[in-house]
Every structure is written in C-alpha cells, then in structure tokens.
Image (tube, rainbow, N blue to C red):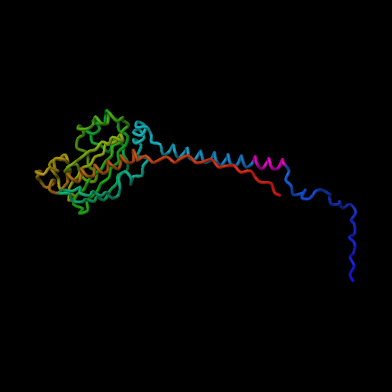
C-alpha cells in the first residue's frame, strides 16, 4: 500500500488563475491587428523595391534619342575598352582579292593622342570646321605578314550634318607603324552613328617606298595593275576600314533590348490566430 504525500503550500506562491479553457493561448485582437499591419507594410516594401528595380531596368533598356546617342558616341575613345574599338584580331571572310578570306592581327597600339600630334597638316585643316577631340591608332598585319595596315579613329565634337559634309573631301591619311613614303592604299569611313572618322592605310611589310598612296577603290578594280594592286593592299585597306567602322557603329548604337514586364505586387497575407 502506498501513500501520497500532500503538496506543501509555499507562502506567497500565486494560485493558478481560474478561467475558461485555452484562455492563455487565445491571441489578443490588438496583437492580430499589429501582425496584419506588419505584413501589409512588408508587402508594400517588397513590392516597392521590385517596381523600382523594374523601372531602372526599363530605363536602361530604353534607347537614347538619336541626337543624344550621337553625342555620347563621341566619348567612346575613353568610355569603351580599346579591344572593342581596335580588336586584337579582325576576320574578313571573302575580303581579299577574288573573294579570299583575310585575317588581321594587331601588332602595335599607340596611346590615345592629341590631334596635332597624330595628324598631318592637311587633316588638321580638314577638321578645322568640325573640331578634333582625340585620335586612336593601331597597326595590323595580315596572316602572311606581308602587309601592314594602319587603322585610326579621329573623334570630333561635331554634329551629324557637319560630319556627313566631310565625305569626298578626306585626303590620304597618315601612317602609323611605317613611314608615309611607304603608303600604298587608303580608305576612310564616317559612320552615321558616331562623330568619328575611321581611316586605314596599307603598306608592304618589307618597307619598300612607293610613289604615292592611292584610294583603295582604285587598286581594287579588275584592271588595276602594279604590285600594290596585285598584293591586295587596296582590299586590305577597304575591308579593315569597313569592319572597324561597323564595330564602332555597334558600340555607338547597340540593338535595343526588350524591356522587362512589370512585376506583380505580392499579395499580403493576414496571419491566422493560433488556436
């Protein structure tokens, strides 16, 4: 037989409060309201952040007006990586005589230069109406290393109509990486997307002097004679001017990306009272 020792009362210990069942687990209406308010505020903050991010992405995807994009392109000489403007390797499928493929490798890169230091007097006179900001230059060679091609970019602060007026008035460009007396063929390009003159001038890699540089188009004619024409130096100059010019135009006016759709605002949830 066992006995149970009665519980000894402790003086000052509060007696358990009597009340209806589950009274201590029922949530107070004020607490429920506070939790609901917090949920609503949190949903608002999350939704606001999502809308802000979407608006920023949409603004970045929206293309600039044409005149603003044109002006902005005038600063590509300092804003774009040099390898984007003057790539280390340029390919020219079907760019050589008879549709032969060409590949050019950059072998020399000049620091960006002031216009008086990089351009001959006739070019400085030509650009007196447009102004001149900066000049970038590099030298390329073909896969056989039998030719050299100077590639240059002359950046200006001019507007599009002023730049378009230069067409047909550009003289033979200066060389870089070889002397002016070695120039064989030359070509220029004035992209409509940027206030820049792209120029190229080709030469024999063996350094032989020539009588005078010729427009690339003259040496590309089927009936063109002479060593420079037969070696494809006209094709070299024209193809590189076109490809570098196209690359510059792409940097100045990249294809517009589709803007992201607006996100849906999160639906706030009201916490259920614990029972």
Give the vertical position of 113 relative to 67 (above or below).
Answer: below
Q: Does the segment drawn in magenta span residue 34? A: yes
Give left or right: position of 115 versus 210.
right
Q: Residue at x 31, y 29 (%)?
A: 159
Image height check: is 91 above or below 1?
A: above
Instruction: Place residue 249 in its image quadrant.
Output: top left
Query: Residue 197's x, y, as percent?
Result: 26, 36
- Looking at the magenta stretch, what is its main secondary structure? helix
On the rendered image, what quadrant is the N terminus found in? bottom right
Q: Is residue 225 magenta?
A: no
Q: Position of residue 135 (x, y in %)?
A: 30, 38
* Residue 73 or residue 51, whichever sits in front: 51
Q: Quadrant of residue 40?
A: top right
- Point 78% across, 50% down: residue: 21
Residue, far bottom: 1
User: Left or right: where does residue 81 sit relative to residue 260?
Assistant: left
Front residue of 40 and 246: 40
Give the quarter of the image for residue 234.
top left
Residue 138, given in percent of the width and then of the height, sits at: 27, 45
What stretch of residues is rendered in magenta? 29-37
What residue is shown at x 34% (from left), y 38% (from top)? 253
155 or 180: nearer the eye? 155
Q: How many marks?
A: 0
Q: Is residue 40 left or right of residue 246?
A: right
């Amino acid at each position: 037989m066992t006995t149970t020792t009665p519980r000894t009362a402790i003086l000052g210990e509060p007696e358990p409060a009597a009340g209806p069942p589950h009274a201590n687990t029922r949530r107070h209406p004020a607490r429920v309201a506070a939790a609901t308010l917090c949920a609503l505020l949190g949903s608002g903050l999350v939704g606001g952040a999502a809308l802000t991010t979407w608006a920023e992405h949409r603004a970045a995807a929206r293309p600039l007006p044409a005149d603003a994009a044109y002006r902005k392109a005038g600063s590509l000489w300092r804003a774009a990586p040099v390898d984007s403007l003057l790539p280390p390797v340029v390919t020219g499928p079907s760019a050589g005589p008879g549709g032969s493929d060409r590949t050019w490798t950059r072998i020399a890169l000049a620091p960006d230069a002031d216009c008086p230091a990089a351009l001959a007097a006739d070019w400085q006179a030509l650009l007196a109406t447009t102004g001149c900001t900066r000049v970038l230059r590099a030298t390329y060679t073909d896969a056989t290393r039998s030719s050299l091609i100077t590639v240059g970019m002359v950046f200006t602060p001019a507007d599009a109509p002023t730049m378009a007026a230069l067409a047909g008035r550009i003289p033979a460009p200066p060389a870089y990486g070889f002397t002016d007396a070695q120039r064989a063929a030359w070509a220029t390009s004035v992209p409509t997307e940027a206030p820049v003159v792209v120029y190229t001038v080709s030469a024999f890699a063996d350094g032989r002097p020539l009588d005078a540089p010729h427009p690339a188009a003259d040496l590309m004619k089927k009936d063109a004679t002479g060593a420079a024409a037969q070696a494809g130096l006209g094709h070299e100059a024209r193809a590189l001017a076109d490809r570098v010019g196209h690359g510059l135009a792409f940097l100045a006016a990249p294809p517009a990306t589709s803007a992201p759709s607006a996100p849906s605002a999160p639906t706030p949830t009201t916490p259920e009272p614990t029972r």
